[in-house]
Structure formats: C-alpha cells, structure tokens
Image: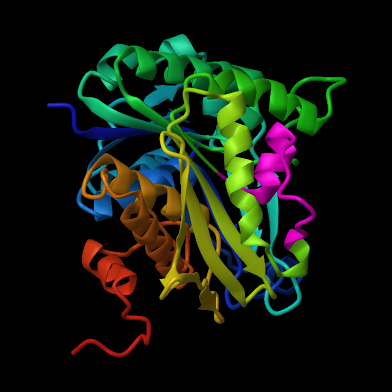
Amino acid sequence: MKDVIVSYGEIMGRFSPDNNRRFRQTMPGNLNVTFAGAESSVVVSLQLLGCQTRYVTALPKHSIADACEDSVRRFGVDTSYILRTDKGRLGLYFMETGANQRPSQVIYDRADSSVSLTPGDSYDWKNIFADAKWFHISGITQAISREAAEASILAARHAKDAGVTVSCDLNFRKKLWNWEAGTNSRDLAEKTMRRLLKYVDVVIGNEEDAHDVLGIQAGDTDVEAGDLDINRYPDVARQIQQQFSHVSHVAITLRESISANHNNWGAMLYTCKDGSAHFAPMDGDGYKPYEIRNIVDRLGGGDSFSAGLIYGLSGEFKDSPGDALEFAVASSCLCHSIEGDFNYSSYEEVTALKNGSTTGRVKR
C-alpha cells in the first residue's frame, strides 16, 4: 500500500540567542542550537499528526550530523535514505528573533553543504518512492546550488513516474539564488522553478512568492502595509493554473504583518478542477484571519501550513478542500506559539482550534 509522504531538502543547524536578544548582545556567549529545514519541518509535522513519512537529504560523516539526523528520526520519520557523504559540510543558519517593530533577521552559512554538492542520481529514487503517495519539496532547495536544483527536478520527475502526488512551496529566498553568474536572483529562480513546476500538482506560496518566482501579482496589494485585499487572490491562482494546466490546487497563505509580534494569518485554497476558492478561517460567511498577537517564533509557520494541507488533501479531507484548508491554517497558527521550526502540535489540538477553540484556556 502506498501511504508514505516523502520530502527532500536541506536540514541545517540553527543558532539563536535567548529572549529576543541580538547577536551583539549575546556574543561572545551562549546560543541555542537546534536543527531545521523546510522539508524536514514538513515531515516532522506530518509524523506528529499520525502520518508515515520519509526524509531524504545528504549529510556529512561526523557526530554533529548524527545528532542532526537523530533530531528527525526520533519522531518516527524514516531516515534510512539519507546519504552520508565525504563531500561537504552541515549547513548553518543564525536566527535573531525580532520583536514589535524590529523584524527578525536570518544569516545563512550554507555554501558547500553536503546536499548542495550531491548529484541527484546518487539517491535511490526508485525505492524512495516505491511505497509513497505524496512528495513535497520547496524552492529553497533549488536555491542553494545548481546540483541541488537538478536533484530536485530529477526527484520530482521520478515521483511523477511513480504516480506520486507532488507539492511544492515556492519559498523564494533572494539571498540564496546566486549560483549562476550573470543572472539575478529572480530570473534564476523563475527559470529554475518553471522546470520543476512541470511535475507539480499542488502549488503553495504567498503573494510575494507568486510575484518573485512567476511574475504574478495580486493587483496593488502591499504586503508590507499589513492589509490584504483577499478578493484578488483567486485571480492569482487562476493565472498559475493557466501557466501550468496540470496543477490541481493552488494554496496561498495570507499573512498581514502588523509587527514582528502581531500577524493576522489565514489562507486561500483554489481547486483548479471547478474553479472554486476557499478561504480560512471563516466567521459565519466571511473570512476572518487568526489574530496572532504574541508570536513566539514564526519560522516554520509556512512549513506547518504545508504539512496540514498535505495531511488534509492526502487523506481525511481529500474530498473537502475547505476542511483541508481550515486544518492547515489552524495547524500553522499553533506553530506560531512554539519555539523552533518544528510544530509540536497534535491532531487533537489542531482539530480543536479548527472547530473554534481559540481562547487558550488551560486543559485540566
């Protein structure tokens, strides 16, 4: 039976100061170290929701990489297809958590990581997808190197050949798209991602991703202004469908950034077959986003949304896109309350929020 959800991408060490401190306040001194990456966060969230998952990447051969692999495997994720190589290093990133009007800052240190140097044909894609029903990837992996981009496209092609549903979070990261001299980051992202999207069934992104990767914009919406005109987003999805006619669903997350601590959060899911657009969360007949006024950590929020959507569309809510979207948005909302990239939220907790339990009362 094909029931495994697979993801492929880079996992890194994450270094962060405590208590919203800045690096210049903390260093020299102690930093918290965890492990995270977009695709690993997705499968960990799915495993915690009760799914069978598999994570594919490449890591160097040393004890820190052992700890990195352990950080995913301990949840029950299958890591047996992770390659351990003599080439490359463990990628790192440094996260300074913002507060109020000061935004968070991310510093990448990912050049020459093992996954960025490992050719796509090094992975055993045939067996990786033999029992799989879904494959998830993000645009971040394509951004880190030409080798990783080609491996991603090869993986997606093998997934489609195996009859696996493929989802992709566009996830544009301007700082990373620099592996082709003479090509700017947006142009490189667009020409690479268009090759990948030929194999993608479910496209996930936000308004910035749609513009930066595909040149599609939600009218005059200004994401920095903290106010979104949601009526424009079905047209964004239709434009994606027109360019990639095989796509079955387009999901667009709707984040209104009031400050670093206060975001309004929701999403739209467009079903290409019938042209229907669902929004969540809803209040009666209208869209009413979650008001997240005390964000603990917003990194991983998009990945927890992807995980929730994959959970819904691949199983329980596969015939109810509105319910799948509500589940995904609730899952992601909870992730904003948890430190670190992994969403330590259970199916029961997500379902309670989806069904209207929003007060945060103590459960006794």
| Quadrant in the picture for residue 259 | bottom right
x%, y% of residue 19?
59, 78
Relative height, residue 186 to residue 21 (above, below)? above
Query: In the image, residue 142 lies at what x, y percent?
Result: 60, 28
Classify residue 45 as left or right of residue 303.
left
Residue placed most toward the observer, 22 or 318: 318
For residue 321, side relative to residue 243 (left or right): left
Q: Residue farthest to the right?
A: 182
Residue 72 visible at all: no
At a point 78% along the width and 32% down the height, the residue shown is: 185
Tell me the residue at 45%/63% (across/down).
280
Q: Which residues are magenta?
A: 205-223
47 or 276, nearer to the observer? 276
Q: Quadrant of residue 216?
A: top right
Classify 230 as above or below 68. below
Where, quadrant-wise, is the N terminus in this rendering? top left
Q: Position of residue 235 (x, y in %)?
A: 63, 44
- In this rendered view, identify the residue nearer to me: 134 or 38: 134
**Residue 53 falls left or right of residue 141:** left
